[in-house]
Image: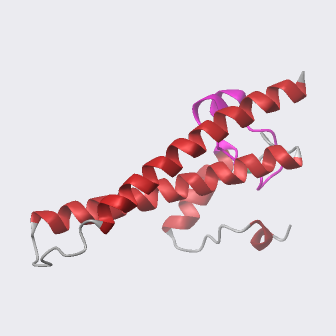
Amino acid sequence: MAVEKANQENEVLLAERQKLLDDIELLKETLRGEVDIDVDEGDPDVIEREKSLALLSTLETRLASIEDAIKAIGRGDYGICQRCGKPISAERLAVKPEATLCITCQAEVERLKKRGVYAPRRSSWGM
Ligand SMILES: [Zn+2]
């Protein structure tokens, strides 16, 4: 049953989303608690803070992907590549339930990102 499957995926994504929101909140809390630190170069606290900021940005990127996937479930096109419209393989979705791009497009997007020419919005692909 397609609908049951979508519900299951939605639950996985919602649980993952909640976990990320908790992690982000915790991290922000930690960062807020460190505002009075001495900002000398090489201060271990500064290094820790930069690590936390990098982690925060990773978590926020992942959260955005998960939210995109949840929206895709709502639209009924979850599991369909948002770039080329082909189905995303079940193996890929099992490993990365928030994937909204097929493996080919993901690789292409990574390549474009490295060159700094990738704009993440769907509309930029003329859709
Ligand atoms: Zn694709």
Q: Is residue 56 left or right of residue 11?
A: left
Q: Residue at x 71, y 28 (%)?
A: 90
Q: Is residue 10 left or right of residue 53?
A: right
**Measured along the vertical axis of the image, is residue 11 above or below residue 112?**
above
**Residue 101 belongs to the span the image colors magenta:** yes
| Residue closest to the eye, 19 or 63 | 19
Q: Residue at x 39, y 62 (%)?
A: 28
Pinpoint residue 32: horizontal percent, then vertical percent: 32, 68
The answer to whether residue 28 of the structure is visible from this angle is yes
Q: Quadrant of the C terminus?
A: bottom right
Pinpoint residue 41: horizontal percent, then vertical percent: 11, 76
Residue at the top extreme, as displayed: 1
Q: How is the image coloured?
A: secondary structure
Pinpoint residue 36: horizontal percent, then vertical percent: 19, 76
**What's the magenta bit mostly, secondary-structure-wise?**
loop
| Residue closest to the eye, 25 or 10 | 25
**Measured along the vertical axis of the image, is residue 5 above or below residue 48?**
above
Q: Residue at x 59, y 74 (%)?
A: 117
**Residue 70 belongs to the span the image colors magenta:** no
Write down the region rendered in magenta. Answer: 82-103
The answer to whether residue 97 of the structure is visible from this angle is no
* Res 17 → quadrant: top right
Q: Residue at x 61, y 37 (%)?
A: 15
